[in-house]
Image (spheres, rainbow, N blue to C red):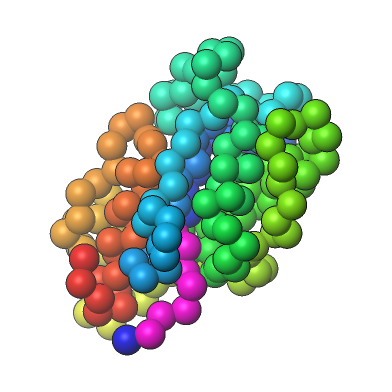
Amino acid sequence: MTLPPILVLDLEATSEDRETAGIVDLAALWLDESMAGIHSLSFDERCRPRPHCEIQDEALKVNGCNWLRDKTVMTETEAICRLAAWLDGRKAILAGCNPGYDWHVLKKGWQAAMDDHESEWDLITPWPFGFRTIDVHSAAVIDAIQAGAADQISAEGLKSRLICNAFEVPEESKPHRAMAGASWECAVLRKVMGLPV
């Protein structure tokens, strides 16, 4: 089966507000392993958020971020520049469990990285993701309905734990790490599409 270029991306942020959040952890996996090409199949970097981002204690408890002031950890701009270099000009459909939030937070960080003239990284790649995304949660809800398991779906849909259990993939660790999130999301999407995991 030929797949479109789908990149399963997850990030951990400093706030639930997508307008003010900064990125502290960023990971991505190609759904189709052939997309890796000469690069690795995955991308995974911790970082310090860009200045003036909102920092919510509750968000930091969820992702376990304790490296906000650790100068040995790269900046958000550096992480985004590395992501751009890893993508190497390839465009992709963004997928994930909360892709609208992740898309928006990453877009704001990407623009800030492009505007950062003092960065030692040369970010010349245009924004690589279209506006449309693939929502793992929605795919799991549709799969549950088709499988006759609609009784597990509440008004909020399916919780991540239920999705992992239904698809027999390991639950995301706590505190949350972006690569752990991207990994289970990728596994669920592959199972929904009938691909080997």
Check the image and report above or below for 99 versus 18.
below
Q: Nearer the viewer, residue 197 or 142?
A: 197
Can residue 15 be seen here? The reply is: no
Percent across and percent down for residue 102 are 57, 51
Name the residue: 36% across, 76% down. Answer: 142
Quadrant in the picture for residue 141: bottom left
Q: Nearer the viewer, residue 120 or 162?
A: 120
Check the image and report above or below for 120 versus 172.
above
Image quarter where the N terminus lies is bottom left
Percent across and percent down for residue 173 are 28, 37
Q: Is residue 46 left or right of residue 41?
A: right
Quadrant in the picture for residue 20: top right
Q: Is residue 88 left or right of residue 137?
A: right
Can residue 166 be seen here? The reply is: yes
Q: Seen from this angle, which residue lies furthest bottom?
A: 1
Name the residue: 70% across, 56% down. Answer: 125
Q: Seen from this angle, which residue lies furthest front?
A: 38
Quadrant in the picture for residue 103: bottom right
Q: Is residue 78 left or right of residue 120?
A: left
Q: Which residues are magenta?
A: 2-8
Q: Is residue 16 left or right of residue 51?
A: left
Name the residue: 25% across, 79% down. Answer: 194
Q: Nearer the viewer, residue 78 or 47?
A: 78
Image quarter where the C terminus lies is bottom left
Percent across and percent down for residue 109 are 69, 42
Percent across and percent down for residue 65 are 47, 23
Check the image and report above or below for 41 versus 117.
below
Q: How many marks?
A: 0
Name the residue: 32% across, 52% down. Answer: 183
Query: Does residue 57 show up magenta in the picture?
Result: no
Q: Nearer the viewer, residue 5 or 24?
A: 5
